[in-house]
Amino acid sequence: MLNPFRAGRIRVRLTVWYVTMIAAILVIYAAGSSALLWWNLSRELDRHGIQDIETVEGLLRFAPDGHLYFDEDYHNHPESKRLLERLLEVVTPDGKVLLRNQRLGQRALGGTPFDREGVGGYSLRWGQLDDGTSIRLFSRRHNIGKNPVIIRIAYVADEIRKPSQQFLLVLVATFPLTLLLAGFAGYVLARKALRPVEEMTVRAEKIDAQSLNERLPVSEENAETSDEIVHLARVFNRMLSRIEQAFEQLRRFTSDASHELRTPLTAIRSTGEIALQKQASADQYRDVIGSMLEEVDRLTLLTENLLAISRADAGQVPVRFSDFAPLRLVEETSALLGVLAEEKNQKLSVSGDGRARVSGDRVLLRQAILNILHNAVLHTPSGGTISIVVEDEGDDWVAMRIIDSGPGIPHEHVPRIFDRFYRVDSSRSAQEGGTGLGLAIAKWAVEAQQGTLSLETLPGLGCTFTMKLHRAAPLSS
C-alpha cells in the first residue's frame, strides 16, 4: 500500500521550497523598501535643510557692537518658528562661534570649518555631536554686510531613522503571519497538483503481470492540473502497452516453443515405445532409429533457432559491419540449396549488378538469405522457378529480391508472416521440417543491419521477399 508519509515528502519539500522563496522575496522587499524610504526621507531632509539655510540668511543681522543676532521680527516670520526645532550654529571662516540657538546650546556643530566649506554651494555631510548624537549637517558661506560667515544647520538623524525603523519593524512583524499563510497555501497547491500523481501511483501499484491491460488514469481534471502530469501518464501508459505486448509475445513464444519441443519428443517416445512392444528385424530397428534421428535433427534445429532468437532478443549477437558485394554472397548461399532445388526439379537462378556493394554483416545477411531461400524451395511446387535478383536502386539502397512461383500467401496471413512460430499451413510445415522461426530470424537479421525486409504476394502468383541494405561506396578502379 502507499505510504502516506513517503507520499507526502514531495508535498513537504515543495511547501518548504515555496515558503523559503516567499521568505527570501519578503526579505528583499523589506530591505529594498526600507532603503527606498530612507533615500526618499534623506532627499526630503536635504531639501528642508537647504530651505532653512536660506531662511536663516535673511534673518541674521550684525549689531553695531559686532554682535550677531536675529532680526527683531524673527518670531513674526512663519519660517522662523521652524528654525527653533533645528540645530543652528554660525561661525567665522576661522572657526570663531558667532551664534548658537537654544536647542544646540554649548555643543559644537561641525568643529573647525574645513577648506572651502560652503563655498559656491551647500556642503552636506553626516556627523556627530559631542554627546554622540548622529546628525545631518548642512553648511553654506554667506556675507552679512561685509562680514563672511558660515551658517550651519543640522537635523538629528533619528528624524529619518525612526520612520525607517518603524516601517521595517512593521514589515518584519507581519513576516510570520505571511509565511504561515504562504505555507498553508503552498501545501494546498502542492497537494492539489500532486493528487493525480498519487492516483497514478496507487493504480500503478495494483498493476501486475495478470493485469497489464490496465492503464493509468488520464482525465480532463488531470489535464487542467498539469500538462506535464498528463504527459507522464501517457508515457507510462505507452510503456505499459509495450510491456503488455512483450509479455504477450513471451507467453506466445513460450507456449509455441513448448508445443514445438513436445512434438519431436513425443514422436521419439512413441516410435521407441512401439518398437519395444514387438519383435523386429535389424533392418526394421534401423528404420526406427533413423526415424528417431530425423526427429532429433528437427529438435536440434529448433533448439538452435530458439537459441538464436534468445540471443538476438538479449542483444548478444554482435553485428560486424563491412562493405561487400551482395551478388557474390547470394551466389554462395544459393549453391547450398542447389541440390534441394534439383530434387524438386526447380529452376534456381541468380542475376544482378555485380558492382553493387552494401554495408552490412555478411554472416547475418547470409542467414537471412538462406532462411528465405529455403522457405521458397519448400513451398514452390515441383517444376517451379526461384530467382534472386540484386539491384542497385540508386537511392542509397541496394535491393535483393527472392522471387518464387509458388502458391503465394493469402492476404490475411501477410501481417503475421514474420511472427515467430507462425505458419500459413502448419501441417505441411511440420511435415517438411519447418519450425516457424526462419522468417522471424531473417527479419531480425536484416533489421539488425539497419535494413528492411518486406513481402509482396498475390495468391497463385508466388511471393517476392525484398531485402534492402544501405549502399556502400564502390571500389575505386
Image (tube, rainbow, N blue to C red):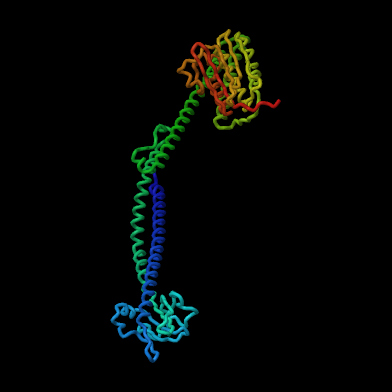
Considering every residue shown, the one lying at the far front of the view is 146
Residue at the image position 65 percent from the left and 21 percent from the top: 329
Q: As drawn, is 92 to the left or to the right of 176?
A: right
Q: Nearer the viewer, residue 264 or 399?
A: 399
Question: Which corner quadrant of the image does residue 53 belong to?
Answer: bottom left
Residue 98 percent coordinates (x, y): 41, 86
Residue at the image position 34 percent from the left and 79 percent from the top: 83
Please, is residue 464 above or below residue 227 in the view? above
Q: As drawn, is 426 to the left or to the right of 477?
A: left
Residue 180 percent coordinates (x, y): 34, 58
Quarter containing the N terminus: top left
Whether residue 1 is visible, yes or no, is: no
Q: As drawn, is 414 to the left or to the right of 81?
A: right
Considering every residue shown, the one lying at the far bottom of the view is 65
Residue 131 percent coordinates (x, y): 42, 82
Please, is residue 328 above or below residue 346 in the view? below
Considering every residue shown, the one lying at the far left of the view is 76
Q: Nearer the viewer, residue 457 or 203?
A: 457
Whether residue 367 is visible, yes or no, is: yes
Please, is residue 25 above or below residue 355 in the view? below
Question: Which corner quadrant of the image does residue 285 belong to?
Answer: top right
Residue 233 percent coordinates (x, y): 41, 38
Quarter containing the C terminus: top right
Q: Total label count? A: 0
Please, is residue 143 above or below residue 390 in the view? below
